[in-house]
Image (cartoon, helix red, strand yellow):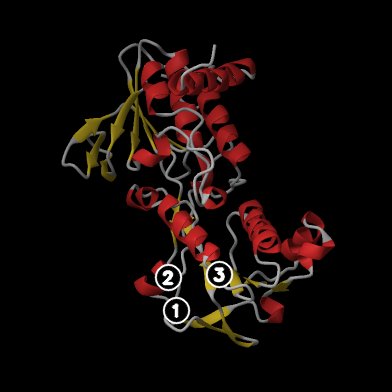
């Protein structure tokens, strides 16, 4: 008998919890009645909430997520799926069935003295233990012409389903001999994701627009990604791609999105479609909470405990030393719930 979607996702959620338990990941205990709140409903946040709830049925475990789409049932085959971020392994129904309270709201402030969260809706939530999985946010870049209009016209599609659909639509309308530009920042926070993006674009063009061109503007100082790209795709696919590192003019100096122009150290480019990936930093709430240092990321110990507030655990990509892969995010939840929150 075929399982319903909610039952299927609930089973996946329990499977994730069982995996953590098998690895000794549920050693942490919360005293009965203790209130643990997880901020962020991505893979790391959802996994941590499920693990804490399974190990501490008498405690209160609450997950706060601002984007309902992150916890919606996965939609296979949706337009732009290749450019969306990983969803949580369990959806909204599965979390609630597991006993995790879910609040769909945005955390706008943390009062450490009173141990309360302020939400965008005006509500406040009290907590005894706090875990943050804030994800990432774009970092401001001093590039002339890179304004709100340019960011809309040249979607990053780096965690936004709306931008992913817009990019997919632009690629579908690309002229047969069109030019696509993928911009990668000098500080590439997610090397694996950046490589995957380049491979996905190259394979798409090779299949759908074989006469089109792809230029990768890679602002990094090494050719590590370029070399990995050549190893990852067939020669016929790689042949249609020009990869420029910083030494080859890969740094963007100015843009004019209205005319499709990009100025680099090696001269100007005109593009039909631009996937402009910004430099990233830890999600906004991490900065608001005082958990980031000069690097823009959250310094933590190996268990994810913040170096700036020892009573807080940080999960996922926002950590300074994070691997920034899906496996790394899930591993951070495992380590955190293994021994970081003894009640």
Q: What residue is at 47 percent from the left and 27 percent from the top?
A: 90
**Location of residue 262 with respect to 148 vertically, above or below:** below
User: Is the residue marked by circle 3 packed among few (<14), some (14-19), or many (20+) residues within 10 Å?
Assistant: some
Total numbered labels: 3
Tell me which numbered mark, 2 or 3, is placed earlier along the sequence: 2
Q: Does residue 338 appear anywhere in the picture?
A: yes
Residue 68 horizontal/vertical position (percent): 34, 39
Residue 62 relative to residue 155: left or right: left
Observer-side mark, 1 or 3, equals 3
Q: What residue is at 43 percent from the left and 26 percent from the top?
A: 49
Q: What residue is at 49 percent from the left and 57 percent from the top?
A: 157
Q: Which residue is mark 3?
A: 174
Single out the residue that lies furthest toward the bottom: 267
Q: Which residue is mark 2?
A: 153
Say whether marks 1 and 2 touch (CB < 8 Å). Answer: yes
Q: Secondary structure at mark 3?
A: loop
Single out the residue that lies furthest toward the left: 122
Spatial separation of the CA atoms under disc 2 and disc 3: 14 Å
Towards the viewer: 210 or 286: 210
Spatial separation of the CA atoms under disc 1 and disc 2: 7 Å
Tell me which numbered mark, 1 or 2, is placed earlier along the sequence: 2
Q: State which quarter of the image contains the C terminus.
A: top left
Single out the residue that lies furthest toward the right: 235
**Residue 265: mark in rendering:** none
Q: Which residue is mark 1?
A: 257
Spatial separation of the CA atoms under disc 1 and disc 3: 16 Å
Q: State which quarter of the image contains the N terminus.
A: top right
Residue 7 horizontal/vertical position (percent): 46, 17
Say whether marks 2 and 3 touch (CB < 8 Å). Answer: no
């Amino acid at each position: 008998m075929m399982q319903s979607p909610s039952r299927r996702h609930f089973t996946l959620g329990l499977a994730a919890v069982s995996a953590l338990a098998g690895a000794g990941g549920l050693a942490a205990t919360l005293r009965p009645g203790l209130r643990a709140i997880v901020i962020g409903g991505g893979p790391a946040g959802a996994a941590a909430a499920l693990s804490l709830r399974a190990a501490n049925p008498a405690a209160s475990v609450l997950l706060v997520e601002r984007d309902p789409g992150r916890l919606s049932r996965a939609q296979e085959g949706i337009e732009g799926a290749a450019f969306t971020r990983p969803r949580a392994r369990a959806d909204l129904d599965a979390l609630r069935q597991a006993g995790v309270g879910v609040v769909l709201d945005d955390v706008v402030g943390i009062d450490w003295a009173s141990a309360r969260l302020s939400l965008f809706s005006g509500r406040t939530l009290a907590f005894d233990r706090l875990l943050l999985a804030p994800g990432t946010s774009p970092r401001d870049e001093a590039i002339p012409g890179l304004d709100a209009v340019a960011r809309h016209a040249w979607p990053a599609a780096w965690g936004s389903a709306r931008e992913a659909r817009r990019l997919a639509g632009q690629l579908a309308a690309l002229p047969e001999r069109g030019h696509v530009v993928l911009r990668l920042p000098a500080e590439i926070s997610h090397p694996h994701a950046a490589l995957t993006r380049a491979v996905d674009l190259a394979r798409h063009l090779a299949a759908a627009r074989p006469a089109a061109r792809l230029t990768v503007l890679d602002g990094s100082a090494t050719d590590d990604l370029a070399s990995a790209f050549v190893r990852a795709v067939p020669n016929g696919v790689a042949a249609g791609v020009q990869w420029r590192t910083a030494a080859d003019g890969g740094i963007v100096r100015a843009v004019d999105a209205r005319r499709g122009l990009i100025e680099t150290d090696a001269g100007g480019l005109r593009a039909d479609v631009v996937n402009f990936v910004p430099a990233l930093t830890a999600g906004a709430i991490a900065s608001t909470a005082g958990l980031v240092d000069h690097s823009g990321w959250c310094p933590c110990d190996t268990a994810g405990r913040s170096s700036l507030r020892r009573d807080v655990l940080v999960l996922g990509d926002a950590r300074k030393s994070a691997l920034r892969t899906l496996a790394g995010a899930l591993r951070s939840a495992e380590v955190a719930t293994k021994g970081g929150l003894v009640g």
